[in-house]
Image: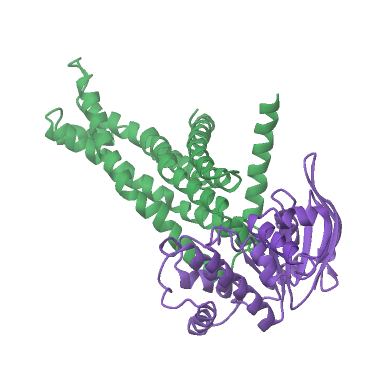
Amino acid sequence: MKKLIKYISDIGSYFLMLGKVFKSHTKSSVMKELIMKEIDDLIINSLGIVAFISFFVGGVISIQTALNLENPLIPKSLIGFATRQSIILEFAPTFMSIIMAGKVGSFITSSIGSMRVTEQIDALEVMGINSLNYLVFPKIIAMLFYPFIIAIAMFLGIFGGFLAGVYGGFTTAADFTQGLQDTFYPFHLVYAFIKTFFFGMILATVPSWQGYYMKGGALEVGKASTNSFVWTSIIIILTNYIITQLLLS
Amino acid sequence: MIKVDNITKSFGADEVLKGISATFEKGKTNLIIGRSGSGKTVILKCMIGLFTTNSGEIFFEDQAISKMDIGAQRTLREDIGMLFQGGALFDSMNIEDNVMFPLRMFSNDKRPEMLKRVNEVLKRVDLENVNHKFPSEISGGMKKRVSIARAIVNNPKYLFCDEPNSGLDPKTATVIDQLIQDITKENNITTIVVTHDMNSVMEIGEKIVFLKNGTLVWQGSNQEIFKTDNKDVTDFVYSSDLFKKIRNIQIKEH
């Protein structure tokens, strides 16, 4: 019962935090710099890992699909089709977001948590600065560019699948391309980017909440980062289910 | 001048401040002393607005904080400089940007003007040629000085210091104490220092407030603290071996 009350209180505290983030704005000249820095930290610095993982996972999806096609009546174009659908619908938006919960989420929690432990957040408050606006708002704005990362993940995932499929000798370029074009619903892209937007907001705010309200010392910063990853992942998976149910069923 | 009037503060069932009233005078270094857990830092955090009191009132120049609107509270905070125990410097910024931070947030000056002021205050705290270093690249004493520079860059009317000497060697601690006192006199500001360092009490304790278990049990000056027969105060003062020996020598001489 106590745990349940704590969860409810945490949810309340999360939404109260969101309210405070949009109050008492930091001076615009300072905020511009903060937003640029967050875009660099959260978006640009994530491009490498996103590109690497997407490219190779795309290749693996393509190879695994090819190896499971034992029936000669099933066309080889299915490899391109399966790769496209897997990457656009789930891998790029959802599983890349889980990976980002580990990279970006832990970074956000540990950086804000360290500021809490070393009284840097108190210093902001004493100066009369809305620390939530100063720390979290630029992250939210930076994560509006998150769909850009996912678009790159989609492109590189499919490209990796193409290279692995064609140059691995599992299919031809023509078959793979035909598969990519088969029964393509543009709404699937819309669906993917809608959920990417929500995941971006979750990635910016849940780890911030974990870091901002943590108590204790250095050890607790580590624990908060772990909790941040766990809760961000859970919320992403639940949101994924809800959005899929609403938009695709 | 800052006045606290019968303030109380509890954390759950734990009553940390039990009706404290005191006045902290302008142009003086006011010290709040007491053993660990006596409520020193809590009263400081109540005064700077990081904690809200359960009852009682805090006045800044006869203006009650609770009666101020948000705008007035914000303006008041621009007049407050704070030296945190660990310095609380922003890790992601170099020393120059750390000290410039309050100016960037609250003044409309251009960068060259702000830089001029930053260099002035860094010189005032005897730190030069460190502008482009990061907090992780300087010593504990230097961090405290940078923190003082950041606290005074906006010409505050009130300076709060939480354990300014913790973790410093005795000589550096004396330098920091002296710096705090000099800045208080030069700018005629109200300074409140939370400490349990008896050297600070001797050096800069113009007004001392002694807390025990959340209550104010004694107040006076650094001259009076060694003459008082208040048992709580004498227990605290002479808990240090050095002061015990000095007292024994004085007793023998008499």
Closer-to-camera residue (B190/A29): B190
> Residue A13: percent from the left, percent from the top?
67, 43
Q: Position of residue B179 (x, y in %)?
A: 60, 75
Residue A130 picture quarter? bottom right
Q: Say above or below: A125 vs A74.
A: below
On the rendered image, what quadrant is the C terminus of chain B found in? bottom right
Q: Report the label total.
A: 0
Q: Which residue is found at the position 66% from the left and 75% from the top?
A: B181
Residue at image position (86%, 72%) is B62
* Residue that appears at 61% across and 58% down: A131
Question: On the picture, is B113 further left or further right than B197?
Answer: left
Percent x, y of residue B242: 63, 59
Mark yes or no: residue A5 visible: yes
Residue with the most extreme top position: A71
Quarter of the image holding residue A92? Answer: top left
Taking the spot 15% from the left edge, 29% from the top edge, the residue there is: A171
| B164 relative position to A227: left or right | right
User: Would residue A4 be found to the left or right of residue B114 on screen?
Assistant: right
Camera-nearest residue between B191 and B56: B191
Query: Height in image: A101 above or below A27?
Result: above
Residue B80 seen = no
Quadrant containing the N terminus of chain B is: bottom right
- Colouring scheme applied when the structure was drawn: by chain
Compared with B49, A74 (above or below) is above
In the rendered image of this protein, which colour is used for chain A? green
Chain depicted in purple: B
Give the image quarter of residue B86. bottom right
Q: Name the residue nearer the viewer: B151 or A108.
A: B151
Q: Provide residue B91's location: percent of width, then percent of height.
A: 47, 60
